[in-house]
Amino acid sequence: RLEGKVPLIGFSGAPWTLMGYMIEGGGSKTMSKAKKWLYKEPDASHKLLATLTKVVISYLIEQVAAGAQLLQVFESSAEYLGPTLFEKFSLPYLEEIALGVKKGLSEKGLNDVPMIVFAKGAYHSISKLSYSGYDVVGLDWTVDPNIARDFVHITVQGNLDPCALYASKEDLIEMTSAMVRQFGVRNYIANLGQGIYPDRDPEN
């Protein structure tokens, strides 16, 4: 039981990321099988992505109904898409999720909750992501904080390299402090720029 001591965060994979795992059958270094669909079967791809979008919206709404106080949508496979494919096969569905969740919560009489979008590797579209209906844009560790501040007009989250957790405590503190200095403290959530790896030192 959290007893209000920490927030309860709900999450879901985004449609393109889910589609990739469905077609590839697991992780992939290239997502070539899934991207083949985008090029050879664009209509079928849009149909599948639209179906997954509806499922994600319902899933996130039910998480809020169960007590989630914040939602994060992970487009972890955005890095496999260039700007054109991202804006055609990912961004519209991310936008639909943000709109659909807020509408669904209202219809159910549930309070609105903040939403974070994290599209790993989509550095080329961070400005558009900031206008996609979310409250926060999550940044991976490859994004320059100064550039992010120039192109994102809402709150940002990130973006310490997860491998920094392998460093000494002293170095980790310095890297984290430097990151915060670069981003500044306004409209900023300090966090990693991706998930925690299972072999990291628990003390860090």
Image (cartoon, rainbow, N blue to C red):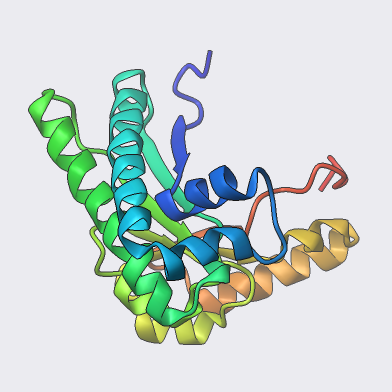
* Residue pictured at 36% horizontal, 59% vertical: 136
> To which quarter of the image does residue 113 belong?
top left
Q: Nearer the viewer, residue 36 or 124?
A: 36
For this view, does 18 lie left or right of residue 59?
Answer: right
Q: Nearer the viewer, residue 195 or 43?
A: 43
Measured from the top left, where is residue 159 in percent x and y? 59, 66
For this view, does 197 lie left or right of residue 86?
Answer: right
Measured from the top left, where is residue 142 in percent x and y? 63, 76
For this view, does 70 lie left or right of residue 96?
Answer: right
Residue 37 vertical placement versus 22 (above, below): below
> To which quarter of the image does residue 126 belong?
bottom left
Count all numbered tags in the image, as a single digit: 0
* Residue pictured at 23% horizontal, 40% vertical: 101
* Residue pictured at 36% horizontal, 41% vertical: 52
Q: Is residue 192 visible?
A: no
Furthest-front residue in this view: 40
Measured from the top left, where is residue 175 in percent x and y? 74, 71
Q: Is residue 95 visible?
A: yes
Residue 195 vertical placement versus 109 (above, below): below
Furthest-right residue in this view: 168
Residue 64 vertical placement versus 42 (above, below): above
* Residue pictured at 23% horizontal, 58% vertical: 133
Measured from the top left, where is residue 192 in percent x and y? 63, 58
Q: Nearer the viewer, residue 44 or 1?
A: 44
For this view, does 166 lie left or right of residue 39?
Answer: right
Furthest-top residue in this view: 1
